[in-house]
Amino acid sequence: MEAIGMSTNDLSVYYAEKQAVKRVSLDFRAKQVTALIGPSGCGKSTFLRSLNRMNDLIPDCRITGEIWIRDRNINDKTTDVVSLRQRIGMVWQRPNPFHKSIYENIAFGPRYHGTKNKKKLDEIVEQSLRKAALWEETKDRLHNSALALSGGQQQRLCIARSIAVKPDIILMDEPASALDPVSTSKIEELIAELKQEFCIVIVTHNMHQAARVSDKTAFFLNGEVVEHDVTTNIFTNPQKQETSDYISGRFG
Ligand SMILES: Nc1ncnc2c1ncn2[C@@H]1O[C@H](COP(=O)(O)OP(=O)(O)OP(=O)(O)O)[C@@H](O)[C@H]1O
């Protein structure tokens, strides 16, 4: 299957009268990780959530501009958001497994989207857990509650759950910020594996993490993208003073 990315053109997000994201145009390539960095409240999460239309659920939230996947602008009333969210998965800051077994957490999405065959579901569960580096730890207890897993394992389960419906793009909102250092490094290793197959966009407060995991970085400030470049350029040779001040810890 051909790997694909996505892009935004002139994307703005408003909460009532307040503009939280200002005319952002960014390109996210397939098989690359893009990190979104910036101080608290600069609009990173709002922007990320608008990419799979999660902001539609917030009353008074309005989005203008375009979000392109292949030749389709998905910021359009005719878009079927359920199938859109199958193509664009989301992993949240806190692991949020369903109150179900490990197996059922993974099988839920494919079943919802029409896969009923038990053998096929078994295969998807195994493949997804393998890709999320969780198979060895869970293969003997697939029918136990997902809530009995550690926080780091739960987060890898949530990643497996998003992979199970075969998305093109995975959005991650600070996926390791609630985890200990060992679990964090497992998530980072996993991101490096997953980018062979998916387009990944990750919000992170941790600049070392952005430098370790991403190919490109976009620096947000007050809802705008100040600078977007190859990650090594952002961290070693930023072109804008604000970027330089932020990455050197002068504010934020
Ligand atoms: N549901 C909402 N309703 C109204 N305003 C909101 C809502 N969510 C976020 N905001 C506002 O939008 C702005 C951007 O918030 P957002 O959470 O996107 O920033 P962020 O860069 O992700 O911050 P953080 O790093 O602290 O998570 C902030 O001023 C915030 O108060």
Image: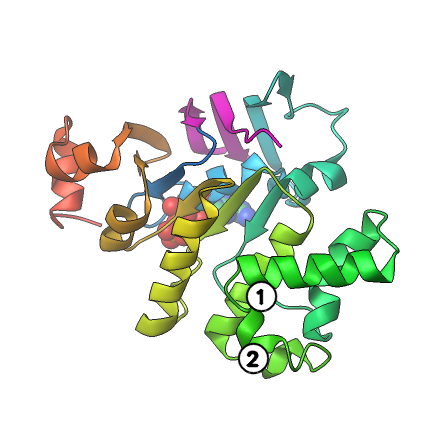
The type of residue carrying mark 1 is Leu
Image point (67%, 45%), residue name? 57
Name the spot of residue 61 as percent of width and height, x first. 60, 37
Name the spot of residue 63 as percent of width and height, x first. 58, 29
* The image quarter in which residue 53 lies: top right
Are discs 1 and 2 less than 8 Å apart at CB? yes
Image point (31%, 53%), residue name? 205
* 21 relative position to 63: left or right: left
**Number of numbered discs:** 2
* 109 relative position to 249: left or right: right
The type of residue carrying mark 2 is Leu
Name the spot of residue 208 as percent of width and height, x first. 22, 54
Q: Is residue 114 visible?
A: yes
Which range of residues does the magenta coloring cover? 1-28
Q: Is residue 95 visible?
A: no
The crowding category of the residue bearing disc 2, from other C-alpha atoms within 10 Å (few below 14, some 14 to 19, many at least 20), is some
* The image quarter in which residue 176 lies: bottom left
> Which quarter of the figure is the N terminus placed in?
top right
The crowding category of the residue bearing disc 1, from other C-alpha atoms within 10 Å (few below 14, some 14 to 19, many at least 20), is many
Say which residue label 2 marks.
149
* 72 relative position to 230: left or right: right
First in residue order: circle 1 vs circle 2: 2
Image point (77%, 33%), residue name? 80
Q: Is residue 70 above or below residue 238?
A: above
Main SS of the magenta segment?
strand
* Image mark for residue 157: 1
Q: Considering the numbered disc 2 on the image, is that residue within a helix, a strand or a loop? A: loop
* Image mark for residue 209: none
Q: Is residue 25 above or below residue 110?
A: above
Q: CA–CA distance between discs 1 and 2?
A: 9 Å
